Image (cartoon, helix red, strand yellow):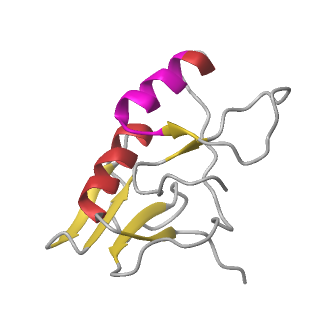
Amino acid sequence: MTSRFTELAVDCADPRALARFWCAVLGYEVYEDEDGDFVSIGAPGTGARRPGHAPPSLAFARVPEGKAVKNRLHIDVNPSDREQAAEVERLLALGARHVDVGQGDDVPWVTLADPDTPNYQF
């Protein structure tokens, strides 16, 4: 018997705003919104407690403390219907921003931070 990955929990300052951002990025919808202190989002039509295989949901929980160190986990996304440059522009328009994590100029990926990540170098 094994477990399956069903949800990624994210502590943040503004769960509703971050949920809106990630819904726009991934095409997800809100499953649950508890007074803006906890918001759960996931793939359309799959429901929060879905049986079988479905993409993991994301849960955003309000916490009082700010982010103090580099994330040990990050989310990789790839465009499904456009070129990378066009997707990067779309994500920047949604509130993402470029960050330097020491990736250099010769890598094929682009590193962005979501709107909840503080403005500091990693």
Q: In the picture shown, does residue 118 fall above or below 106?
A: below
Residue 102 drawn in magenta: no
Q: Which residue: 46% across, 48% down?
A: 114
89 in magenta: yes
Q: What's the residue at 34%, 58% (across, down)?
A: 41
Rendered location of residue 76, percent (x, y): 64, 46
On the picture, is 36 further left or further right than 39? Answer: left
Task: Give percent across and percent down for residue 109.
Answer: 73, 32
Q: Which residues are magenta?
A: 86-96
Looking at the image, residue 119 sits to the left or right of residue 73; the answer is: left
* Residue 107 in the image, given as x and y percentages of width and height: 82, 30
Name the quarter where the N terminus is drawn: bottom right
Instruction: Name the residue at the right extreme.
Output: 106
Residue 65 in percent (x, y) is at 40, 80
Nearer to the camera, 100 or 1:
100
Query: Residue at 61% of width from left, 42% of height from top?
Result: 99
User: From what the image shows, is residue 85 above or below residue 40?
Assistant: above
Q: Farthest residue in the front direction?
A: 120
Per the picture, the main secondary structure of the magenta-coloured stretch is helix
Where the C terminus falls, by quadrant?
A: bottom right
Identify the residue at horizontal 52%, vertical 64% (top origin): 52
Q: Is residue 55 left or right of residue 60?
A: right
So how many labels did they put on this image? 0
